[in-house]
Image (cartoon, rainbow, N blue to C red):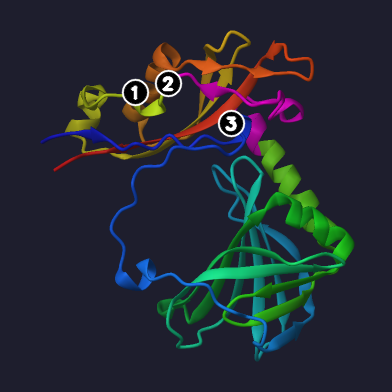
């Protein structure tokens, strides 16, 4: 059996969201044929809150909050999930299935007071769950603005206007959840992301791994998957510590840290005066067995 390590070095946090992604897998023509939709004339669905914000999916590498809106007959759920670096959000509007085709393109997030900002979105049904999803990627600053705005409009296949109310609760929940995750990874939340610009790899991260690095025990057990590690990067650019935030099995976890400690090299982060400082990087490493 051949082995391969997927090129998965997606840097977040101290790397300020910069990343190197593997070439995407082939996708269906429906997804390839993305277009930009004019949503200016679609109907507005005014929606009020039902219940309170709740933390859900207290995950291994991100945090999310959710709140229900609308009525029992026409329920609407807003979910907000953070990226591991807290710089990006995934906003999802969940409504009853609409038997509509998948649509992918550009939509808009509008806050009041505020201006319209365009983002990528997907609109699709999950038939087995009887739900329809409009999913956006947006900036973390969008969530901060909700506390002052009180109203959020998301324009996609339809326009949903939500009276978010006490969105400050959502922000606090997300921040507390993320702080606990950082602490569990060995990162001081108060210093997360410290240093600008963030540390950057000296060479392409793919060069840190070779196909010969796949642990024999993992090959024998047919283990593969994603290992998320938190790296402490010293002021000299060397990796000082490696903590497994989300593992894929002992052999793969150990190999990920061992290789990164030995081979990873960075241009260190710097402080306001330009002096190098200690910082962190969150690095997902995906191990794939080739056929």
| 210 left or right of 253 in image | left
| Quadrant in which residue 164 is drawn | bottom right
Q: In terms of sequence position, does the residue under pointer 2 or pointer 3 come before the other?
A: 3
The label on residue 250 is none
Determine which residue is flagged by label 2.
203
| 286 left or right of 195 in image | left
Q: In terms of sequence position, does the residue under pointer 1 or pointer 3 come before the other?
A: 3
Extreme residue in the bottom direction: 73
Q: Which residues are magenta?
A: 181-202
Could you say whether the residue bearing mark 1 is in a helix, strand or loop?
Answer: helix
Look at the image and tell me in which quarter the C terminus lies: top left
Within 10 Å of disc 2 (Cα), the crowding (few <14, some 14-19, many 20+) is few
Q: Is residue 280 above or below residue 4?
A: above
Determine which residue is flagged by label 3.
15
Determine which residue is flagged by label 1.
207
Q: Residue drawn at (42%, 83%), measured in percent from left and top?
A: 101
Report the Cα–Cα distance between label 2 and label 3: 14 Å
Can residue 71 be seen here? The reply is no
> Is 158 included in the stretch rendered in magenta?
no
Q: Are marks 2 and 3 in contact (CB under 8 Å)?
A: no
Extreme residue in the left direction: 1
The foreground one among 66 and 291 is: 291
Report the Cα–Cα distance between label 2 and label 1: 7 Å
> Is 197 included in the stretch rendered in magenta?
yes
Q: Residue drawn at (83%, 64%), measured in percent from left and top?
A: 114
Give x and y (percent) for residue 120: 55, 63
Give x and y (percent) for residue 215: 25, 25
Q: Are marks 2 and 1 in contact (CB under 8 Å)?
A: yes
Q: Is residue 167 above or below residue 244?
A: below
Can residue 194 be seen here? The reply is yes
Give the number of marks.
3
């Amino acid at each position: 059996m051949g082995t391969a390590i997927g090129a998965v070095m997606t840097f977040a946090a101290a790397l300020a969201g910069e990343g190197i992604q593997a070439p995407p897998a082939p996708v269906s023509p429906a997804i390839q044929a993305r277009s930009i939709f004019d949503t200016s004339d679609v109907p507005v669905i005014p929606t009020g809150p039902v219940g309170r914000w709740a933390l859900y999916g207290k995950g291994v590498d991100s945090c999310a909050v959710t709140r229900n809106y609308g009525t029992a007959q026409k329920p609407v759920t807003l979910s907000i999930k953070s990226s591991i670096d807290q710089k990006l959000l995934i906003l999802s509007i969940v409504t009853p299935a609409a038997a509509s085709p998948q649509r992918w393109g550009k939509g808009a997030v509008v806050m009041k007071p505020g201006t319209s900002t365009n983002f990528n979105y997907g609109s699709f049904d999950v038939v087995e769950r009887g739900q329809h999803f409009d999913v956006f990627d947006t900036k973390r600053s969008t969530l901060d603005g909700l506390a002052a705005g009180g109203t959020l409009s998301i324009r996609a296949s339809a326009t949903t206007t939500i009276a978010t109310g006490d969105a400050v609760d959502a922000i606090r929940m997300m921040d507390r959840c993320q702080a606990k995750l950082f602490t569990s990874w060995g990162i001081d939340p108060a210093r997360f992301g410290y240093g600008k610009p963030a540390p950057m790899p000296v060479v392409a991260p793919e060069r840190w791994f070779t196909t010969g690095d796949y642990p024999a025990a993992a090959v024998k057990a047919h283990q593969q998957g994603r290992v998320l590690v938190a790296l402490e990067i010293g002021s000299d650019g060397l990796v000082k510590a490696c903590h497994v935030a989300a593992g894929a099995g002992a052999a793969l976890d150990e190999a990920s840290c061992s290789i990164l400690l030995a081979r990873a090299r960075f241009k260190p982060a710097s402080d306001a005066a330009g002096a190098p400082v200690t910082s962190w990087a969150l690095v997902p490493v995906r191990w794939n067995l080739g056929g």
